[in-house]
Amino acid sequence: MRFKLRQMEVFRAVMVTGSINGAAKLLFISQPAVSRIVAHTESTLKLSLFKRMKGKLMPTPEANALFIEVEAFYQKALQVERFAGGLAQGASGTLNVSCSPCLSRGLIARAVWKFVQRFPNIRINLKTTLLNEMAHELLSTKVDLAVPVLPLDNPNLRTEIFTTGRMVCVVPSDHELTARENIGIRGVAEWPLIAHHPSIPFGQLVSSAFDKAGVPFEPHIDVYQTDVACALVRAGLGIAIVDEYTLDGIEGGLHILSLVEDIILTPSVVRSSLSPARGHAEKFADVLREVAGASL
């Protein structure tokens, strides 16, 4: 290797500090040592990396281009160092998780909190993903584990339902329906309805419930996000049928009614059957089961 690790370290130090003196202080070595290493690096790479202009050390275009690669390498080396240090303290590494947006506010947030308390050296990358994208993320190993609110239909996925939930009806907190504890589909249809668009899974669930009840599905307003539906309800534009999980993270202005007809949700842990199970994913699945069980 013509560009050795020590040379990279010295080169980066000069680029970061802007001077030979600064690099020497950063690395706790002498200025002549820095100068020698820089000169040797330029010689072995056959590149001019720095020029002196008006007493200042100025990087060449080649040095600026090289610094981008060296910095990326340096940050990766730091990550490896942190990983190695964490091994002595127990389980470590990274867990990549995706979940349905509605689950992120309450159930997943509580699970992540508990997981971090139990495994502080495991880093979590958490993202929200729509149902139609989760299978691809799992099968392309972009995530280790997915937590959808509804089933994923793919023969190469392993699915375990760990809890059940329901769709509920929300009305403004000053609505006359607040005197009731529940409402049926026919009762919902008597009011201006804010509903998920029938092209998305929640909309399909609700429209199917209306069909089963023999009631025309005629929303007053179509939405694509549940929190938008709740905001419109709070503003007095109608009532809505939404998942119970989103309401975990929404405060004030709403009253919740149970639906007489069950519209069931099935949050599940989903993993690829094409990849070996990762221990971190299993640990997180265990925590999810605990959190879901405690909230029942």
Image (cartoon, helix red, strand yellow):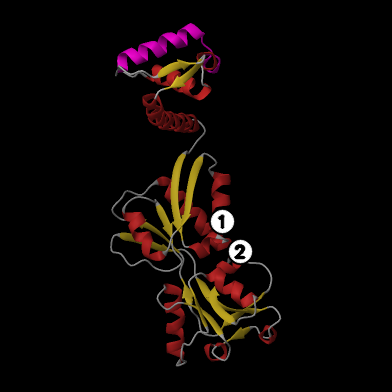
Q: Residues within 10 Å of mark 1 (few under 14, many from 20)?
A: few
Q: Residue at x 42, y 78 (%)?
A: 198
- Is the stretch drawn in magenta largely helix, strand or loop? helix
- Across and down, in percent, residue 96 comes to 43, 49
Q: Residues within 10 Å of mark 2 (few under 14, many from 20)?
A: few
Please check the rendered image and state whether residue 43 is part of the magenta-colored stretch, yes or no.
Answer: yes
Residue bounds of the magenta highlight? 24-45
Q: Is residue 211 left or right of residue 153?
A: right
Please check the rendered image and state whether residue 285 is part of the magenta-colored stretch, yes or no.
Answer: no
- Across and down, in percent, residue 146 comes to 42, 57
Circle 1: residue type: Ala
- Tell whether label 2 touches label 1 (CB within 8 Å): yes
Residue at the outermost top position: 32
Residue underneath mark 2: 249
Give the numbered dot on residue 109. Answer: 1
Q: Nearer the viewer, residue 91 or 141?
A: 141
Q: Nearer the viewer, residue 133 or 29?
A: 29
**SS for tag 1?**
helix
Q: Which of 140 and 90 is in front in this view?
A: 140
Residue at the outermost front position: 54
Up-down relation of residue 159 to residue 95 (above or below): below
Q: Which of marks 1 and 2 is in front?
A: 2
- Across and down, in percent, residue 112 comes to 54, 52
Q: Which of 19 and 146 is in front in this view?
A: 19
Residue 272 seen? no
Up-down relation of residue 115 to residue 67 (above or below): below
Q: Which residue is drawn at 42% across and 18% down?
A: 50
Circle 2: residue type: Gly
Q: Return the disc, 1 or 2, that comes first in the chain's sequence.
A: 1
- Across and down, in percent, residue 121 comes to 52, 39
Say which quadrant the C terminus sits in.
bottom right
